[in-house]
């Protein structure tokens, strides 16, 4: 007869082995594939947190008006969107539809991460009414990979109450850098705690968004060359770049900017202006909805000026795309058609965002608030840099653009910083797209 | 081996086998994959192609990576030293068996249980010059006239992140060293007191050599943790000013997920891993030494 302890031991060993095998099997089984049961098809939809002012409302409206198609919205923090989206698409786990920052589209198109929707776009009756800047960023090798969705132009916000207090005419915002400097000085002179200007020093994306237009309006360029090859960095060969950095440095050195600007990132982009202590700040149209809710804040919008006049804007915003390998191609195309439809674009306008249907942006949108006229016009005259190396060049804290801001604006070594940035840009631009 | 002994041995192996298989799969398979990736040009999106040692050769000329290695070393040195001193100090306080000491042990250990990310956010907002607690307290007691930009310079930023990390991990080091101190037989310390050794002598000549292996354990954890530090720098300093507070793992993250160059990131990872392996081997060799009386 077998030893009683042996029987127990064998039983325990058998259970342990079974449990281990079960665990390994569970881990190996493919994680949750969505089964299409009878009923509406659900598409996963990703958007970045910068869109949170309007995207949930839009998705709710979509779900309410579509019986056989539902959108399951995931809002991803903007700072992580590129990483999360790229990794997911690389693993084949990407969403069915995504609202992507237009500036990243050249990279994704070049990396074959998005579905070619050229024929869908051309089939739209309002194709020629779509924002040209958006279409340009969504084009790669003559093919279209996304449709315009939301617009975001960069403009100059100024505090009309502070302007009046400083003896400045609130209907006469500055139109040159010299005027901006003079106005900033008058507002800073109002007393301790008051500053003429603000920008978040640790947000390279924000500062590209607001500084490049001032450079463009002065006839300068950061990059030249179209497409993904043969691009040149023109940091040292385009004088307005140095002039813009010196202009900002002067404001910093003259203490017209709060000292916290040096270590502030995107999370505090609006806070100083909201506090009613900052005279002017360059922000995007997205801020209007938030700032309008500040009851005691009186502000107006002006174009971002060039050095000696003129104006420009950074035509930003999101575009809707279908990640490559989507299993719901036809339904995803429905979402694209909805997003660019008159009804949806008017809803976007009502939520304070610049529409990407030009006719709606120029006629319907400005009627909702007189300040929107500036936004619509800025958007129409705006442009955006086209590069597959956007993230590495200009969008992270360790990027050459951020280093340039640190050394030129805060450090004051404009020319030295520019040479360094120029060579760093050239190194990155010489790398292949992927 | 007798039949019974063999049966015992097999039963033991049977119990250990499942977890060994899982651990091997989850460690060695990715390791081999990573080494393979490092020998390829492997973008995050798109197809990959064999590239031999190209990534490693590029890493040799990468000044940002080189600087990040040095910075990680600097941070590791500070952390290792700090954890030993502070952990040792706390351990000697709480190693006594007295009423109420449990409260102190708990309080000192509490920061260990919150995640590094949570701790980083906590401190990030505490040191914020406009709305944070730290500058407000300093100004209220009239230390300084304007709020200090804690993350404005490399030195200040490193100091702050080091303090935060020490605050967070000291309890863990304390626990390990405390168990070491408590395992020292009382007769030894009493004998040394009879022989006329003062407190410092006791520590230097008797207690520290006896807890040598516990010290080695703290060193291994702190060196590995310090060298692989990422969360606190990603959240608090973002590697700034410039790239001066970029750690080696942060640079690997940038290479892989910002520059989308997984192959290069893998090569950097292999280099960091080899460096850590070297450290650990050296540490273990130094710490080896039987507990001689």
Image (tube, coloured by chain):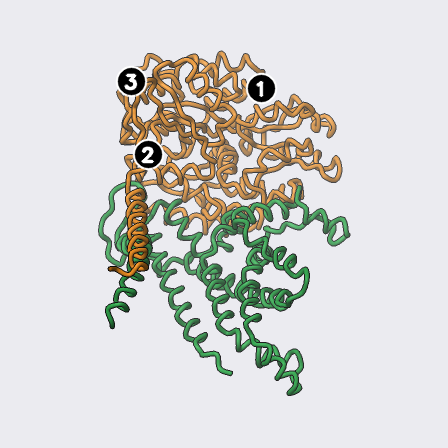
Chain colours: A orange, B green
- In depth, the one of B127 and B50 nearer the eye is B127
Does dot 1 land on a helix, a strand or a loop? loop
- Circle 2 — which element? loop
For label 3, the crowd category at 10 Å Cα-Cα, with few meaning under 14, some 14 to 19 and many 20 or more, is few
Question: In this figure, which residue is indicated by the disc labeled 2?
Answer: A32
- The image quadrant of residue B89 is bottom right
State if disc 1 and disc 3 touch (CB < 8 Å): no
Q: CA distance from mark 1 to mark 2?
A: 48 Å
Instruction: Work out how far the residue at label 3 is from the one at label 1, CA to CA, in angstroms.
Output: 33 Å
- Residue B34 appears in the picture as rendered: no
Marks 1/2 same chain: yes
Q: Quadrant of the C terminus of chain A?
A: top left
Q: Which residue is mark 3?
A: A122
What residue sits right under mark 1 in the picture? Answer: A371
Where disc 3 sits, the SS reads helix
Mark sitting earlier along the chain (3/1)? 3
Label 3 to label 2: alpha-carbon separation: 36 Å
The percent coordinates of residue B155 (x first, y second) are 58, 58
Q: Is residue B284 above or below residue A299?
A: below
Q: Residue furthest front?
A: A1
Residue B176 placement, left or right of B128: left
Precedes in sequence: disc 3 or disc 2: 2
Judge depth for marks 1 and 2 and give the one in front.
2
Q: Earlier in the sequence, mark 1 or mark 2?
A: 2
Q: Residues within 10 Å of mark 2 (few under 14, many from 20)?
A: few
What residue is drawn where x is 33% and y is 48%? B262
């Amino acid at each position: 007869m077998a030893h009683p302890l042996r029987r127990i031991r064998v039983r325990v060993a058998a259970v342990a082995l079974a449990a281990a095998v079960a665990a390994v099997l569970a881990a190996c089984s493919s994680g949750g594939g969505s089964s299409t049961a009878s009923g509406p098809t659900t598409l996963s939809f990703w958007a970045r947190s910068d869109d949170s002012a309007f995207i949930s409302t839009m998705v709710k409206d979509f779900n309410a008006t579509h019986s056989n198609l539902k959108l399951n919205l995931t809002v991803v923090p903007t700072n992580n969107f590129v990483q999360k989206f790229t990794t997911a698409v690389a693993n084949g786990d990407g969403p069915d539809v995504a609202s992507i920052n237009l500036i990243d589209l050249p990279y994704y198109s070049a990396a074959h991460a998005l579905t070619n929707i050229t024929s869908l776009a051309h089939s739209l009756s309002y194709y020629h009414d779509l924002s040209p800047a958006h279409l340009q960023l969504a084009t790669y090798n003559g093919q279209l990979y996304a449709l315009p969705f939301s617009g975001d132009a960069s403009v100059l916000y100024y505090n009309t109450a502070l302007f009046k207090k400083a003896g400045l005419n609130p209907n006469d915002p500055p139109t040159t850098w010299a005027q901006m400097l003079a106005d900033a000085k008058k507002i800073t002179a109002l007393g301790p705690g008051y500053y003429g200007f603000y920008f978040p020093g640790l947000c390279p994306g924000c500062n590209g968004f607001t500084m490049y237009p001032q450079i463009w309006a002065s006839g300068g360029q950061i990059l030249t060359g179209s497409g993904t090859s043969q691009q040149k960095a023109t940091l040292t060969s385009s004088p307005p770049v140095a002039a813009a950095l010196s202009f900002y440095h002067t404001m910093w050195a003259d203490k017209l900017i709060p000292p916290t600007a040096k270590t502030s990132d995107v999370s505090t982009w609006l806070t100083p202006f909201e506090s009613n202590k900052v005279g002017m700040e360059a922000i995007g149209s997205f801020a209007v909805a938030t700032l309008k809710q500040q009851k005691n804040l009186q502000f107006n919008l002006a174009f971002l000026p060039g050095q000696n006049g003129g104006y420009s804007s950074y035509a930003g915003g999101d575009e809707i795309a279908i990640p490559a390998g989507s299993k719901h191609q036809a339904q995803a195309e429905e979402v694209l058609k909805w997003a660019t439809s008159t009804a949806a674009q008017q809803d976007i306008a009502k939520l304070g965002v610049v529409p990407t249907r030009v006719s709606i942006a120029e006629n319907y949108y400005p009627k909702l608030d007189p300040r929107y006229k500036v936004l619509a016009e800025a958007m129409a005259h705006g442009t955006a840099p086209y590069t597959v190396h956007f993230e590495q060049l200009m969008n992270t804290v360790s990027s050459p653009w951020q280093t340039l801001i640190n050394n030129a604006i805060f450090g004051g070594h404009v020319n030295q910083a520019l040479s360094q940035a120029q060579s760093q840009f050239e190194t990155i631009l010489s790398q292949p797209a992927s | 081996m007798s039949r019974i002994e063999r049966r015992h041995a097999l039963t033991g192996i049977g119990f250990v086998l499942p977890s060994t298989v899982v651990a091997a799969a989850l460690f060695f398979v990715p390791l081999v994959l990573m080494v393979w990736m490092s020998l390829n040009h492997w973008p995050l999106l798109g197809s990959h192609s064999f590239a031999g040692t190209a990534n490693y050769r590029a890493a040799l000329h990468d000044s940002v990576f080189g600087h990040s290695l040095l910075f990680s070393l600097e941070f590791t040195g500070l952390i290792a030293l700090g954890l030993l001193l502070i952990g040792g100090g706390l351990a000697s306080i709480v190693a006594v068996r007295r009423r109420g000491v449990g409260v102190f042990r708990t309080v000192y250990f509490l920061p260990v249980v919150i995640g590094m990310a949570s701790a980083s956010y906590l401190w990030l907002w505490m040191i914020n010059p406009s709305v944070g607690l730290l500058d407000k307290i300093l100004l209220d007691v009239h230390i300084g006239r304007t709020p200090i930009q804690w993350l404005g310079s490399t030195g200040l930023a490193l100091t702050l992140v080091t303090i935060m990390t020490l605050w967070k991990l000291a309890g863990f080091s304390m626990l390990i060293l405390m168990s070491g101190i408590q395992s020292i037989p009382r007769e030894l310390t009493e004998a040394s007191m009879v022989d006329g050794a003062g407190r410092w002598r006791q520590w230097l000549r008797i207690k520290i050599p006896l807890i040598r292996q516990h010290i080695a354990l703290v060193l291994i954890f702190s060196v590995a943790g310090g060298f692989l530090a990422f969360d606190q720098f990603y959240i608090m300093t973002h590697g700034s000013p410039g790239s001066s507070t970029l750690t080696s793992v942060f640079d690997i993250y940038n290479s892989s997920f910002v520059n989308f160059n997984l192959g290069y990131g893998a090569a950097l990872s292999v280099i960091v891993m080899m460096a850590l392996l070297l450290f650990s081997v050296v540490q273990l060799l130094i710490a080896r030494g039987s507990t001689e009386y």
